[in-house]
Image (tube, rainbow, N blue to C red):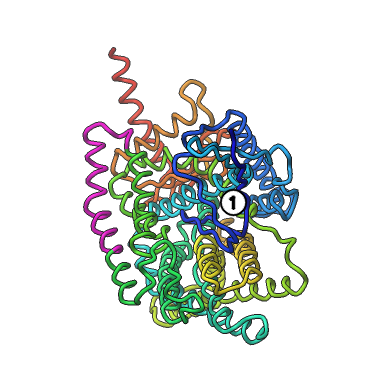
């Protein structure tokens, strides 16, 4: 006989981000016995409801992303985030629909207790768990995969300066705004804590925007990657220092810092763990990973490269967070950087990218909005949101402006000087806060250093910055294209539409062209995915080969270079056809 029904419902506010779950403000703690969840089994109807939930989220997000892009000319990334907000508590509130409210029950055979879990909470938890872990790690992996270390070194001074200032300025300006102007609502420790939340940049959002807009080759994009990694690491160091110096009765060293709780007890210990993690990532990534990938290809295990890359991506993501106390995105970025040297034929990228870009990325963007309930804020709280949003944007823009000014002052080459528009694009790329900010805010809330009201305000600002970044970047890119319109009119790039291939298929022909050019070793290529199209960039000649399902294959660039590329493909195909004709 069933002895008791225990219903597990939400008792506080919790956020899942970057692979870690932090539950805060819990008024009670109930433990489900080990094995109950797995031994009971999952009803088929529950699985169907989850499939329906994913379908609704995905199609809704894609629809509103397309609407905002077509009507308001917003970047599709921003439109999909807004779509998630409209689907969540701030809009139609999908949680309120009865079909997603039916609880999932588990029976403990040994005690007879029945545990009922709210279905919608499980749905959202699974969505955030999967999309955040896989999508965030992949976005940083692909950013590392497309990074040229030589280009990164060229913007090293700028990226380092912007990264350090990008962490320090938000703290100083937030303290000035919150503690000075709202002294009664914020203590000094709370103001510093809010500043720490806005110290780190969310690189996944700008990277998604830069990849989709085919802007990863820009100087500002390369500087963004370096600066975002640096300010994430620096922000974690500052957080460790903050927990060391804050009084223990106010949630100091005993509170722990993120998943790596060993980071909280001494600054030297924190730095030692970070240094160890950095050395381990570099040594294994530089010496072992490329050799492993080349061994797989040499012994005809190329089909395993994508799976191995996925496993290594998640392993380094977890190692950086759990052992080094670094943001997990740092590990994912560097393993992508090292992976590139062992996979010149892009086996992993070609296999992983389509699924991430068409399925996981829209779910990830939607999950940001699903977590946000703007209705709980009153007028004076919205004033605070507006003030902190302005501070969050200006502090990053100011840090990048100072960094580029220093670079221009030091650099003697006019070719390396930063223009005002390049500085604006660089700063806009740094505005978004996301995974690290959500984790830090939840840690501070769990330690009792900020109130639930301050926590909600901080999360709203974080989400608004993720919406603002794609919009600001779109404005910058439009101005950049307008500024270069005169030059483009004088030197119009050559474009040739090869079209569709009835028997071979456009996808297969695109793959053949990628394979031919890579095997020739005369070209260095990168393949990107953007809104249904596959784009191969031949770096040395700046020729682009674009495959879209509706248009077929289009080749763009200098006419002579385009013709050389086509001739190279034709020669390879003729050799294969001659061999076929001899059969």
- Residue visible at 60% across and 52% down in the picture: 77
State which quarter of the image contains the N terminus. top right
Does residue 423 appear in this view? no
For numbered disc 1, what is the local secondary structure?
Answer: helix
**Is 259 left, or right, of 290 in this rendering?**
right
x, y percentage for residue 188? 56, 84
Whether 558 is among the magenta residues is no
State which quarter of the image contains the C terminus. top left
x, y percentage for residue 567? 38, 35
x, y percentage for residue 288? 22, 50
The answer to which image quadrant residue 578 occupies is top left
Does residue 230 appear in this view? yes
Q: Main secondary structure of the magenta part?
A: helix
The residue furthest right is 379
Bounds of the magenta segment:
277-304
The residue furthest top is 583
Foreground: 220 or 7? 7
Foreground: 526 or 395? 395
User: Residue under circle 1?
Assistant: 365
x, y percentage for residue 39? 47, 34
- Residue visible at 51% across and 38% down in the picture: 108
- Residue visible at 60% across and 50% down in the picture: 367
Whether 281 is among the magenta residues is yes
The answer to which image quadrant residue 527 occupies is top left
Examine the rendered structure and indicate whether residue 218 appears above or below residue 239. above
């Amino acid at each position: 006989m069933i002895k008791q029904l225990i219903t597990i419902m939400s008792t506080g506010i919790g956020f899942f981000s970057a692979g870690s779950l932090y539950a805060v403000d819990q008024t009670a703690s109930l433990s489900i016995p080990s094995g109950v969840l797995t031994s009971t089994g999952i009803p088929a109807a529950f699985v169907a409801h989850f499939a329906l939930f994913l379908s609704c989220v995905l199609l809704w997000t894609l629809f509103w992303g397309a609407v905002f892009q077509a009507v308001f000319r917003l970047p599709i990334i921003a439109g999909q985030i807004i779509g998630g907000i409209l689907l969540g508590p701030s809009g139609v509130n999908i949680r309120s629909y009865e079909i997603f409210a039916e609880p999932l029950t588990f029976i403990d055979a040994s005690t007879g207790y029945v545990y009922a879990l709210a279905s919608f909470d499980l749905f959202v938890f699974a969505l955030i768990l999967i999309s955040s872990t896989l999508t965030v790690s992949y976005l940083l992996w692909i950013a590392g995969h497309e990074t040229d270390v030589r280009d990164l070194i060229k913007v090293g001074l700028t990226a380092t300066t912007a990264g350090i200032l990008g962490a320090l300025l938000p703290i100083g300006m937030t303290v000035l705004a919150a503690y000075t102007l709202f002294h009664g609502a914020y203590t000094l420790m709370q103001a510093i804590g809010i500043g720490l939340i806005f110290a780190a940049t969310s690189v996944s959002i700008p990277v998604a925007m830069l990849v989709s807009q085919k802007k990863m080759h820009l100087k500002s994009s390369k500087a963004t990657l370096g600066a975002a990694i640096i300010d994430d690491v620096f922000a974690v160091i500052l957080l460790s220092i903050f927990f060391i110096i804050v009084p223990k009765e106010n949630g100091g060293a005993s509170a722990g810092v993120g998943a790596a709780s060993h980071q909280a007890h001494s600054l030297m210990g924190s730095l030692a763990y970070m240094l160890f993690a950095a050395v381990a990532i570099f040594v294994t990534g530089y010496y072992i990973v490329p050799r492993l990938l080349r061994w797989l290809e040499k012994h005809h295990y190329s089909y395993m490269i994508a799976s191995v890359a996925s496993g290594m991506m998640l392993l380094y993501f977890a190692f950086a967070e759990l052992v080094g106390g670094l943001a997990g995105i740092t590990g994912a970025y560097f393993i992508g950087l090292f992976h590139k040297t062992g996979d010149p034929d892009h086996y992993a990228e070609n296999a992983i990218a389509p699924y991430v870009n068409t399925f996981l990325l829209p779910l990830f963007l939607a999950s940001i909005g699903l977590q946000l309930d703007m209705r709980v804020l009153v007028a004076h709280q919205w004033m605070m949101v507006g003030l902190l949003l302005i501070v969050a944007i200006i502090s990053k823009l100011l840090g990048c402006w100072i960094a580029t000014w220093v670079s221009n002052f030091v650099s003697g080459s006019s070719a390396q000087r930063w223009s005002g528009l390049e500085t604006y694009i660089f700063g806009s790329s740094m505005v978004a806060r996301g995974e690290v900010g959500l984790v830090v805010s939840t840690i501070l809330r769990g330690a009792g250093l900020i109130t639930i009201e301050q926590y909600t305000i901080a999360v709203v600002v974080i989400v608004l910055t993720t919406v603002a970044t794609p919009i600001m970047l779109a404005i910058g890119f439009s101005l950049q294209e307008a500024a270069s319109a005169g030059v483009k009119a004088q030197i119009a790039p050559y474009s040739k539409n090869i079209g569709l291939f009835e028997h071979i298929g456009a996808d297969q022909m695109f793959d053949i062209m990628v394979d031919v050019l890579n095997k020739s070793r005369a070209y260095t290529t990168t393949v990107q995915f953007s809104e249904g199209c596959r784009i191969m960039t031949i770096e040395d000649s700046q020729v682009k080969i674009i495959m879209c399902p509706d248009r077929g294959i289009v080749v763009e660039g200098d006419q002579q270079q385009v013709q050389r590329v086509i001739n190279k493909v034709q020669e390879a195909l003729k050799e294969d056809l001659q061999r076929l004709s001899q059969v």
